[in-house]
Amino acid sequence: AKQHGDAASRVLFLGAESAFWILNEEDEEDLKDGTEGLELGEKDLIICPLNDNNDFEREGGAGTHWSLLVARATAEKQLSCEYYDSMGTSSLGAARRLAARLSMLRLAASGPGSGAPAPGVAVVDCAKQENQSDCGVYVLLFVRSVLEVYLSKGAQDAAGAAASVSAFRPQDAAQMRREVPELIRSEAAVVAAAKGGPT
């Protein structure tokens, strides 16, 4: 993050559990209060993994597929959104609802009198998985590409991100599956060292 300075501080990785809560919370005041610390109005790029779970009551979730919503700030408090899915468009409706809620929450942070229609959500032509289990891995690949393009070219370069996500192959997913456990071990060692524990 240090090497990218202010650009990195203007990215929000919205956790899947937060995206799920924002989609399902019915009380608008609770939504505003609960997302205040996210500083949505200050972010240029919001990355939101989506799970197709729609059972708010079931412990542990009930979803079977992951996709990705990316929201970019295009003007003061406005969003432009993209939907990335390695299988189709099964969660496009949820992506549109989340985009509308994120836009509403950004506008709420700017005070009364602000208003804008819900942002459109463009479906990005991205690489498709060849099995029934790699959706989460493809989301990680898409996130990496979107973030790399943003950090090198800025939030407005949606076309650059779209071009980069269409070229992934099953070999890239297999490589990502190998990288993730090593990344987790590496980060755990850093945290343990910072706490003075064994690495």
Image (cartoon, rainbow, N blue to C red):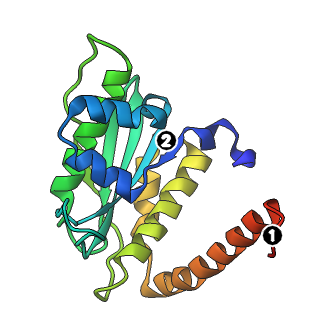
Choose top left, top right, bottom left or bottom right for residue 68.
bottom left
| Residue, disc 1 | 197
Callout count: 2
Residue ID at (47%, 54%): 160
Residue 133, how many percent across, how many down? 33, 85
Q: Residue at x 36, y 73 (%)?
A: 127
In this image, 112 relative to 143: left or right?
left
**Figure quadrant of the C terminus:** bottom right
The label nearer to you, 1 versus 2, is 1
Residue 53 vertical placement versus 135 (above, below): above
Q: What residue appears at the point 33 percent right and 81 percent down from the top-left corner?
A: 129
Against 40, residue 65 (above or below) is below
Q: Amino acid at mark 2?
A: Ala
Asked if the residue at tag 2 contacts the one at tag 1, i.e. Cβ–Cβ closer than 8 Å, the answer is no
Up-down relation of residue 3 to residue 65 (above or below): above
Residue named by callout 2:
155
CA–CA distance between discs 1 and 2?
Answer: 39 Å
